[in-house]
Amino acid sequence: MSRKKEVKKRHIFIITLAKIFVTIPLKIKYRYTYKKYKDLKDGPYLILGNHTISIDPILMGLSFPFHIYYFATEQIFNLGLLSKLLVFAANPIKKTKSVSDLSAIKKAKQIINEKGSVGLFPEGNITYDGVTNKMSPSVVKLIRMLKRPVIFYNFEGLYFSNGRWTVYNKKGKSRGFIKKIINYEEYKNLSDDELFDIVKENLYVNAYDFPYNNFKGKEIAKGLERLVFIDYKSNEPFSTYTKGDMLYSKSSNLTLKFLNNGIVTDNENKSFNLIEIHEKVLTSYLNYYRNNKNFSFDRTVNLSKTDANKKHDLGKGSFTLKNDRVIFNNKHIEKEFLFSEISNLAIQGKKQIIIYEDNDTWLFRFDLETSPYIYLLTYQFYNEGENIYDENISIHKFGLQ
C-alpha cells in the first residue's frame, strides 16, 4: 500500500493567495521588512529560524517563492474545523512539544523526497528575554537525514513588538532575512559538534543588537511579571505586578521602569537589559526553591484535556503549585500531577502550560498576570534532585530549551 502524497499543488496555491491578504497588514503592524528570495532554485531546503513571536512561520514564508511545511505543536491539530482547514491548506508536520517524535521526522523526509521544503524553529520555544534559546543537538540528526541545503533565517525587532511576556503590541521596526545557506557538500564531513556550532552561531540573535530599537505603545510593561515573576530583592514569588511602563513589588521597594529601547531602570537608577534581569530571576527563584521545601501557591486556571483531534474543556478551577507537584481542583475534577510521574511539562504560547502523562495531555490556561514560567522552572528544579543544592550549578542549564 503506497503512502499518501504529502506535497500537493493546492498548498502553494492557497498559501500564495493568503499572502495577498496578510502581507500588507503584517508589514504595517510590525513595520516588517524582508527580502523576497525568488532565485532559490536548488531546493528543496531545510529552513531553520530563530523563534521570536507566534507568527514567525507566516512572516518567514513571505520571503520564499515556495510553500514551507513547518513542524508545528500538536495543539494546533485539536481545534476542530480550524485544524482541518489548516491541514488542508498547509499540511504542517505534527510535533509533540519538547518530545522527540519519530513520525514527524518520517513525514519531513517524505516531504523532502516529494520536492517540498521543510521549516523548523529548533529552539522549540519563543524566547522570553530576547536571546535565542537553547537548542537540542537533535537538529543535527535531522539535517543529516534530509541531506539538503540548509537555510538559516533570522528575525530582528519582533521581540520588542510582541514578545512572549507582552500583553499589548508595540510599534517599532522589524525585519527578516537569510543569514546563511550551507549545502550538503559543505557539512557532510563535519563532526556533529561542528555542525551544531554552525546551527547555534547562525541562529543566535540578541534583541538588543538590533539598531532600530524604539518601540512605543500603551502600557508597555504590561505582562512583564510573566518574566519577572519573583521579587529578586526579597526572593518572594508571585509578588510583582505591572502598571503602565512600571513593574512593582508587593514585598519590597523593587521597581523597574521599562523604556522604549527595552532597557529597564530600577529605583536605584541602575540600568539592565532583560537578559540580565532574567538571570536575576533565575538566581532568585533557585535560592527560593532551595530554602522552601513546603511552599504552596494557588492560582486560578482553565483546564482542558486534549487528544489527537479535539480539546475538551474541563472548566475553571484552583491550581496549586508545590515543590514536587501541581494540583487542580474544581467541582467536577480533582487531580494531582506528581512531577516524578508525568512525562513532561512545557510552556505553550504566552499563558499556558502543557502536562504530558503517558496517555493524556492536559492544558492549563492562566490569566494575564500569572507566569507559566515559574511552573516550568519548578519542574526542572525538582528533576535535578539533590544536584539542585550544588552551589556550583549553573542557572543557565534551566529555562526554555
Image (cartoon, rainbow, N blue to C red):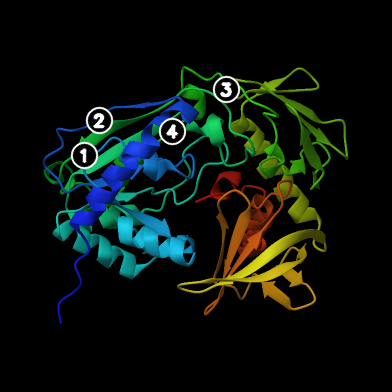
The tag earlier along the polypeptide, 3 or 2, is 2
Q: Does residue 91 appear in this view?
A: no
Residue at point 48%, 45% (across, down): 54
Total marks in image: 4
Q: Does residue 246 appear in this view?
A: yes
Query: Which residue does the numbered mark 3 point to in the structure image?
Result: 215
Mark 2 element type: loop
Classify residue 143 as left or right of residue 266: left
Query: Which residue does the numbered mark 2 point to in the structure image?
Result: 36
The reply to whether the C-beta atoms of the residues labelled 1 and 3 are less than 8 Å apart is no
Query: Which residue does the numbered mark 1 point to in the structure image?
Result: 65
Tell me, for residue 26, which label it has, or none: 4
Please name the amino acid that badge 1 sits on.
Pro
Mark 1 element type: loop
Q: Position of residue 26 (x, y in %)?
A: 43, 33
Please name the amino acid that badge 4 sits on.
Leu
Mark 3 element type: loop
How far apart, in angstroms, are the residues tagged by discs 4 and 2?
15 Å
Q: Is residue 183 above or below residue 381?
A: above
